[in-house]
Amino acid sequence: MEPNYSEYSTLELEDALENIDKESFPDRVERIKVEIASRQTSVKSSLNTVSDDIEPNEQFFKCPTCEKKIGFFSKSANKWGKTKTCPHCNAPFETTVKLKLFAIALIPALIIHLFILRPLVVAFGLHGAISTGIICGILSVLSMRYRKVRSTNVT
């Protein structure tokens, strides 16, 4: 049975290329190289359209290495500290907050807070500060991103 390289992540493709028997499977080696090259050209073309604020390996609740989803309530996402580890591939990643996304969402969030959420919360007999907490939580979740750990070794 032939492997389907289109389902492999880029990291898995590079690993397969390093560990494959190049003499026994020259056609597979060529298919892996073609798949890696096609992904690099698609990444380069998408980099031209992506804003300078967002790095290509940043993900919204996905591991930047294996690209599998990390649940919002998972242990690894809620550990203290900036650096965390993926529960799927054990690769380190760090959490960042995109202030630009936070600022863009702030005005609509304030409008929703003042005219919709706060009156509903008060109508249920609860304190109005609860709606402030809900909006702040939603804003922080929407502006959070995961990215690969940057090396701190500067020589």
Image (cartoon, rainbow, N blue to C red):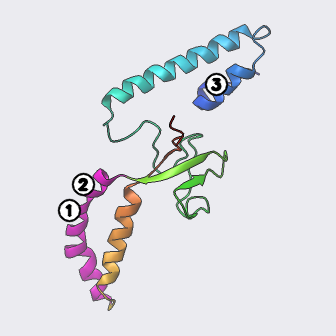
Please tell me whether residue 65 is drawn above or below residue 74 in the rendered image: above
Q: Of all residues shown, which one is farthest toward the front?
A: 155
The picture quadrant where one finds residue 27 is top right
**Foreground residue among 99 and 101:** 99
Residue 90 makes an appearance in the image? yes
**Residue position marked by numbered label 2 in the rendering:** 104
Q: Residue at x 24, y 54 (%)?
A: 104
The disc placed on residue 14 is 3
Type of the residue with mark 2: Ile
Q: N-terminal of the two: label 1 or label 3?
A: 3
Assess whether mark 2 and mark 1 are in contact (beta carbons under 8 angstroms): yes
What secondary structure is marked by label 1?
helix
- List x then y, in percent, for residue 99: 31, 54
The picture quadrant where one finds residue 36 is top right
State whether the magenta stretch is mostly helix, strand or loop.
Answer: helix
What secondary structure is marked by label 2?
helix
User: Is 71 placed left or right of 12 in the picture?
Assistant: left
- List x then y, in percent, for residue 20: 75, 18
